[in-house]
Amino acid sequence: MAKTSPAQFIEEVRRETSKVTWPTRKEAGISTTMVFIMVILAATFFFIVDQLLAVGVKTILGIGA
């Protein structure tokens, strides 16, 4: 593997970052909202599954009221 000088490395980094397509403020907001919605849905799903499994285990083992 060829060694590059620090100056060449910086130039390559600048060249690559100029190729990046950055999201607009609106796109970033929509993506953030979608992530929050998916987190809430996943948390709700796992909470419900956890509660159902807890009830099932308590029923099978005869623990609790």
Image (spheres, grey):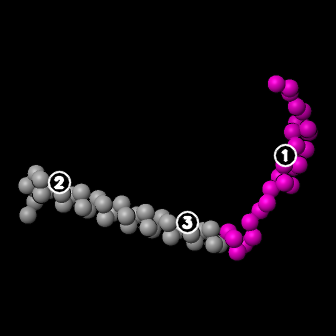
Q: Residue at x 69, y 71 (%)?
A: 27
44 sits left or right of 12 in the view: left
Any mark on residue 57, and which?
Answer: 2
Please tell me the numbered disc located at residue 35.
Answer: 3
Q: Residue at x 43, y 63 (%)?
A: 42
Point out the stretch of residues depicted in magenta. 1-28
Horizontally, is 48 left or right of 26 in the view?
left
Q: Which mark is residue 13?
A: 1
Q: Report the Cα–Cα distance between label 3 and label 2.
A: 32 Å
User: Whole-Å distance between the Cαs marked 1 and 3?
Assistant: 29 Å
Q: Amino acid at mark 2?
A: Val
Q: Position of residue 10 (x, y in %)?
A: 87, 43
Image vertical order of residue 16 relative to residue 7, above or below: below
Which numbered disc flags the more N-terminal residue, 1 or 3?
1
Residue at image position (75%, 70%) is 24
The residue under the point 8% across, 64% down is 65
> Dot 1, how many residues are within 10 Å of its Cα: few (below 14), some (14-19), or many (20+)?
few
Of the two numbered discs 1 and 2 on the same chain, state the one appearing first in sequence: 1
SS class, disc 3: helix
